[in-house]
Every structure is written in C-alpha cells, then in structure tokens.
Image (spheres, grey):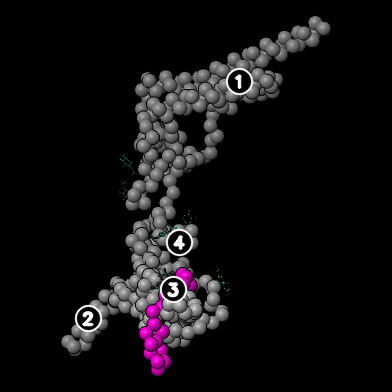
Amino acid sequence: MMKRALLVLVGSLFFLLASSQDCSLPTDSDIIATLSVLLPTGDNSIPYYPNLTGPVQYVCQAQGRRINTYRAVGMIGTFTPNPGDSEVTRLFQMRCYFGSWVAETGGGGISLPPSSIINATVRTDCYVCRRGFGDDTCRECNSACDTGLERCTGPYSDQCCLVFSTSGECSHDCSSSGVNYAASEETDYNCTCNKTCPDGYSIDSDCMNCTKDEVSSSMYITSSQFSSSLIASSTFFLSSSSFFSSSLVFSSSSFVALPSPSPVPCAINISNCIQCIGDIACCDQCDDGYIVLNCQCAQTTSNQLNLLFLLLIIPIFVAIAIALVNVIIIKRARLKKVAT
Ligand SMILES: *[C@@H]1O[C@H](CO)[C@@H](O)[C@H](O)[C@H]1NC(C)=O
Ligand SMILES: *[C@@H]1O[C@H](CO)[C@@H](O)[C@H](O)[C@H]1NC(C)=O
Ligand SMILES: *[C@@H]1O[C@H](CO)[C@@H](O)[C@H](O)[C@H]1NC(C)=O
Ligand SMILES: *[C@@H]1O[C@H](CO)[C@@H](O)[C@H](O)[C@H]1NC(C)=O
Ligand SMILES: *[C@@H]1O[C@H](CO)[C@@H](O)[C@H](O)[C@H]1NC(C)=O
Ligand SMILES: CC(=O)N[C@H]1CO[C@H](CO)[C@@H](O)[C@@H]1O
C-alpha cells in the first residue's frame, strides 16, 4: 500500500518536473546535434559533421504547457551531411527531454520528406511529433480540444491548450486571468482585458473598473466648451450671412440643445447624478444643488452658474442678433422692390 502510494507520488513528481521543462524552439546547434545523432545509420558508421544551409520548415509542433514552449517538433531541414557534400533535404523529429532537445530516434529516424508536407502549414494540433502518425508526423489532440487554439499538452481530453492565460500558461478559458478577460484569433488566443469604457474613461490595471481619465480641472473643460460654443456661433453667423433667408428657419435651440437620447441608468458611479444619457457615463440629471457640467455633477457655485449662463446665453444672443439683421435685410430688399 505504502509502496504504491510512493510510486504514484514519484510518478506525478516526475510528470510535473518533465512538463515544467518544456523547450522553446530548437536553435540551429540543437538541430545540428540532432542530425549528427540521426545520420550515422547503417553499418559503416562514419561520423558526420552536418551543417544547415537554410532555415528548417516545421511540420509538427506539440505544444508545451506555456506559450512558445514545445514538447516535440517535426521538421524538414536542408543541410550538407559533411563539408563539401551536396545539400540534402530530410524529415526528422526532436523531443524535449527535461528542458533540452534530443533526437527522436524512435520516430522513423531521418527520411526523405513526402511531397505532401513540403511547404505545408505547420501542424500545431498535435501531442506527439513522430513518423507513424502520418506524413506530417502529427498525432492529433483529443477532439475535445477542437476550439480556440486547438492545441493540447497531452493525449487526454482535459489536456487542452485552448488559450494562453495572462501569465502565458495553457488554459481552457480565460477565467484564471480575471472575469473580464477574453481571447480570440485577433489576440493570438492570449487572454486580454475585454472590458470597454466610455470615452474619457480607461480600464484600471485589474480590468474591473472604468476610471475617469485625468484630463484636468473642470475649469479647463468648461473653457473648452465655451470656445467650442463660440466657434459654433461664428460658424452659424458666417453660414447664415451668406444664406440669410434660409437661416431664419434656424431656431436658437438648434445649437443649444444637444441631441438627447433617452435617459438610462449610469454605467459608472457619478457622484450626485440621478440618471445618465446616451453615452451611459454621461450624467443627464443631478441631485438638488448640483448642475450637469461635462457629464458630471458640479455644485452650483455662483462662478459656475455664471459660466453656464454665458454658455447658454451667448449662442442665443448671437442667434437673435442674426435673426434681427436678416429681418432688416429682407425688409430693405422688399422696400427696394416696392420703390422700383
Ligand atoms: C555552416 O554554414 C554556414 C553558412 O551556411 C557557414 O558560415 C559555417 O562556417 C558552416 N559551418 C561549418 C562547420 O561548416
Ligand atoms: C517551397 O517554398 C520555397 C520557398 O518559398 C520554394 O523555393 C520551393 O520551391 C518550394 N518547394 C515546393 C516543392 O513547392
Ligand atoms: C469582447 O467584447 C465584445 C463586446 O463586449 C464582444 O463582442 C466580443 O465577442 C468579446 N470578445 C471575446 C473574445 O469574447
Ligand atoms: C500573445 O502573447 C505573446 C507572448 O506574450 C506575444 O508575443 C504576442 O504578441 C501576443 N499576441 C497579441 C496579439 O497580443
Ligand atoms: C458611489 O460612490 C460614492 C462615493 O464616491 C459611494 O458613497 C457610493 O456608495 C457609490 N455607489 C455605488 C453604487 O457604488
Ligand atoms: C477601486 C475600485 O473601485 N474597485 C472596485 C472595482 O469593482 C469591483 C467589482 O465591481 C469592486 O469589488 C472593487 O472594489
């Protein structure tokens, strides 16, 4: 009984150790070392000094437990077996063994690549890369892993690597990264924060709350609104003086009132706000003693009231002035007509 428990313990420790040491893609010297192991086959075992003459083409990559790590790879390499020899192109496999790449001697060794896999897309949905599993050396993942990345870290249905968590670990979903995290093809199946905030707000570092961007004081915002209303007024004035008769149909309210979608509950906590509008983070109605200023609620100090007064009054005043001027112009034109 004890012996068996010990065996299980040692076995799982071995598994943990082995799996925690998946390899990043082999370097050229890893590949050359593999070739020199695989090449001396047959009776006349002369040593080889192979050299790669170009980048290898991966045909199979068995995913490791972390992003950019692998447990096995199959590839087509072009190399000279010895200096001065002519180039040869061969298919072979490598296995990650305790964090180091070793030649896969049991996987069909080194062979001519079948034409079906030359320049084919690398298969990443494999848990083993060895000849015997097809031309592309790929032993497919369990069908339970057929979503997201479609990769696996082992042969069983619970060993799917569908997304990469924010810490780069293989995972079934993004729940370990946080509630608002999601992964898709666009994010390379990396779990990323998928919570969006209204304009002027940014997501905090833990992807939970929208926090207001630190623009600056409300005075600045007020003055920018002030200048934009001035611009609106002068634009209106310019356009109306060239089309004076049509400008009469404009009412002053057309540029004082904002487009008003129906009120909605606020998406974020705006202090002293009763309800929001349109953009769900823009306050529409404030508690008594507060007024809406730049989508926030500001206490009604006389200073702010004066500014608000200016903001509302100037466009109205300009509109009335334009209307008066237009009326005078039209009257004069009529008088002229009558006179002639
Ligand atoms: C291997 O090939 C590269 C160029 O492809 C060359 O620079 C290098 O000297 C060669 N190494 C050996 C050991 O022949
Ligand atoms: C494979 O691709 C390489 C580079 O794109 C090209 O030179 C070569 O001819 C292709 N081989 C085949 C068999 O299509
Ligand atoms: C991210 O959120 C958007 C909108 O909320 C949604 O349409 C999209 O499907 C989400 N992406 C993922 C990968 O869940
Ligand atoms: C996914 O994560 C990897 C590793 O952190 C990174 O190299 C890659 O650019 C990421 N992809 C996207 C689309 O963010
Ligand atoms: C909103 O914030 C105020 C203080 O800023 C707090 O007292 C109140 O409980 C918050 N309301 C909600 C619904 O979080
Ligand atoms: C700093 C802050 O406001 N954190 C809150 C973000 O939202 C979550 C859940 O909605 C709260 O639990 C945090 O306290």
Q: Which residues are magenta?
A: 39-59
Task: Assign the N terminus to one quadrant of the image.
Answer: bottom left
Q: Residues within 10 Å of mark 1 (few under 14, many from 20)?
A: some
Q: Is residue 5 left or right of residue 212?
A: left
- Report how far apart the C-alphas of labels 1 and 2 lie in the structure: 85 Å
Residue bearing the label numbered 2: 9
Q: Residue at x 76, y 11 (%)?
A: 334
Q: Nearest the camera: 322 or 130? A: 130
The tag on residue 52 is 3
Q: Mark 4: is the Cβ under 8 angstroms from ligand 4? A: yes
At label 4, the amino acid type is Asp
Q: Disc 3 on helix, strand or loop?
A: strand
Image point 45% across, 27% down: which residue? 224
As measured in the structure, the alpha-carbon distance from the residue carrying label 1 to the one carrying label 3 is 75 Å
Query: Which tag is nearer the camera, tag 2 or tag 3?
Result: 3
Quadrant of the image for the C terminus?
top right
The residue most toward the front is: 84
